[in-house]
Image (spheres, grey):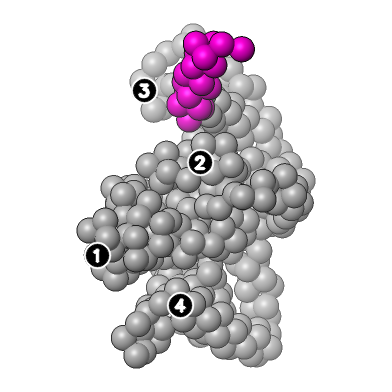
Amino acid sequence: MSAATAAVGRRGGTRSIARRPLVLAGAGIGALVVVFIVAVAAGSVFVPPGDTIGILAHRLLGLDLGLHWTAAEETIVFELRLPRVLTAMTVGVGLAVAGATFQGVLRNPLADPYVLGTASGAALGAAVAVILPVRAVVLEFGLLHGLAFLGAMGAVFLVYRLSRVGGHGQMTSLLLTGYAIASLLAAGLSMAMFVSGAGLRQIFSYLLGGFEAATWVRFATALPLIIGAAAFISIRARALNGFLLGEEAAAHLGIDVRRERAILLGLASLATAASVAVSGLIGFVGLVAPHVVRLAVGPNARIVLPLAALFGAILMVGADLAARLLGEIPVGVVTAVIGAPFFLVLLRRTRAGYDL
């Protein structure tokens, strides 16, 4: 093979790699549209996809597509299923972006959004809310959701502060502190479950996650927190890329390592806490979605973050749809059944030299 032919082949390969994110984004958007329509249409009462599209076009865009549907179908689509599907999409985005952020900052492809004790804090907060003889509702969020959010953020703050004892705040200290605090909070959760009595079922329901209680108000309340945190993380993609090279290399690039680490971990924790407040604990989305994207397009955070958000939304909506069709089983069970073996297959196929 001549040098000219080899050069042409290299240029063709380069163009193919450069187009890969666009192809992946196009395929992801198409898949999201399909799973979105199916998720809104399917359920115990099936609404034909054509009528579903007509209802959405009429209610959201004011368009008349010449289709006819009943008032009951319109209520089911717009008041019950649409906020549920949109909430699942938003939570999928939040967990996927948070997962990509934790994996980048900690330089650990197995890190997930709950690595700093977020899940344990949220679970303990929810359990305490069930035990307390107080009932309060604000914007359709009860005490359970509020204490779950505060518990998640409080756990992250505690882990980060304790990991900086001695003024270092290194990644090893952060991870070990996270595991220690999570274990302590898990013990508190066990005690809360032991004394919860009739509230034990409600605690288990929260721990397994789901979207059956989704409403427009809850969606509108969680949306700015999750999407806002994800957007600010995307803006700081350069800093996240710097962390992939190591903290010393990031510092040589002019990145304020301590400040950027605190900001990125705080934003990722905010997205996670807001997500678990409305959905409960749902695993594997923040682990699988970023990993799949990195295998396809490489580690560049400017590309990984939006694609991870896209595929996180697809995975979450698909899992919620499967949970509904299987009789309203917990969404967390579906993501575990799908995510665990899928992730094991990915690990087996990962090249030996692959690193974040």
In this rendering, the label closer to the viewer, 4 or 1: 1
Whether the residues at callouts 3 and 4 have beta carbons within 8 Å, the answer is: no
In this rendering, the label closer to the viewer, 2 or 4: 2
Q: CA distance from mark 3 to mark 4?
A: 48 Å
The picture places residue 29, in percent across and down from the top left corner, at 50, 28
Which residue is at the front of the view, 182 or 346? 346
> Which mark, by number, is residue 298?
2
Q: Main secondary structure of the magenta part?
A: helix
Q: CA distance from mark 2 to mark 4?
A: 26 Å
User: Is residue 11 one of those drawn in magenta?
Assistant: yes
In this rendering, the label closer to the viewer, 3 or 2: 2
Dot 4 falls on a residue whose secondary structure is: helix
Whether the residues at callouts 2 and 4 have beta carbons within 8 Å, the answer is: no
Dot 1 falls on a residue whose secondary structure is: loop
- Ranked by sequence position, the earlier of labels 1 and 2 is 1
Binning the other alpha carbons within 10 Å of mark 2 as few (below 14), some (14 to 19) or many (20 upward) gives some
Q: CA distance from mark 3 to mark 2?
A: 38 Å
Along the horizontal axis of the image, is 298 left or right of 167?
A: right
Q: CA distance from mark 4 to mark 1?
A: 18 Å
- Write the residue at 60% across / 67% down: 206
Along the horizontal axis of the image, is 143 left or right of 80?
A: left
Residue that numbered label 1 is attached to: 256
- Ranked by sequence position, the earlier of labels 4 and 1 is 4
Whether the residues at callouts 1 and 2 have beta carbons within 8 Å, the answer is: no
- Ranked by sequence position, the earlier of labels 3 and 2 is 3
- Dot 1 amino acid type: Asp
> Which mark, by number, is residue 61?
3
- Dot 3 amino acid type: Leu
Q: In this picture, is 163 found above or below 82?
A: below
* Residue range highlighted in magenta: 1-22
- Write the residue at 41% across / 83% down: 163
